[in-house]
Amino acid sequence: MLAELNPQKTIHIRKVESWVYQTHSALAKNDGHSLEEHIRQILIERALQAQRNFADEMEAIQQQFSCKKEREFPDSAELIQAVRDESY
């Protein structure tokens, strides 16, 4: 049932330079992983970093707006009333 909620996708990569393939194969072997697991971990790490970067950007924007709460803004009731009066 969990697999239905989070279906996994397959990625096929073609036209990889042989030196890139060999480098990652060696790195995977040194870590005791398959090439597939090695590449999967790279993809996961990059995706997590992208999500963290996005969350950091959103937090920075939120902080910008929260700083504005401390300022006093003019009362707009008179302006709203003037616009209403003009429309009648």
Image (cartoon, rainbow, N blue to C red):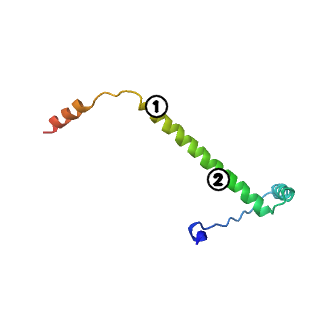
Disc 1 crowd rating (10 Å Cα; few below 14, some 14-19, many 20+) is: few
Disc 2 crowd rating (10 Å Cα; few below 14, some 14-19, many 20+) is: few
Label 1 to label 2, Cα distance in Å?
31 Å
From the top left corner, tell me how far across and down residue 68 is, in percent: 43, 31
On the rendered image, what quadrant is the N terminus found in?
Answer: bottom right
Identify whether 17 is placed above or below 2.
Answer: above
Instruction: Give the tally of numbered discs.
Output: 2
**Residue annotated with mark 1:** 67
From the top left corner, tell me how far across and down residue 81 is, in percent: 19, 34
Q: Amino acid at mark 1?
A: Cys
Q: Which mark is residue 47?
A: 2
Identify whether 68 is placed above or below 39.
Answer: above
Horizontal relation, residue 14 to residue 23: left or right: left
Horizontal relation, residue 8 to residue 73: left or right: right
Q: Amino acid at mark 2?
A: Ala
Determine the residue positioned at 53% across, 42% down: 58
Q: Quadrant of residue 85?
A: top left
Horizontal relation, residue 49 to residue 87: left or right: right
Sequence-earlier tag: 1 or 2: 2
Determine the residue positioned at 69% across, 56% down: 43
Of badges 1 and 2, the one in the foreground is 1
On the rendered image, what quadrant is the C terminus found in?
Answer: top left
From the top left corner, tell me how far across and down residue 74 is, in percent: 31, 27
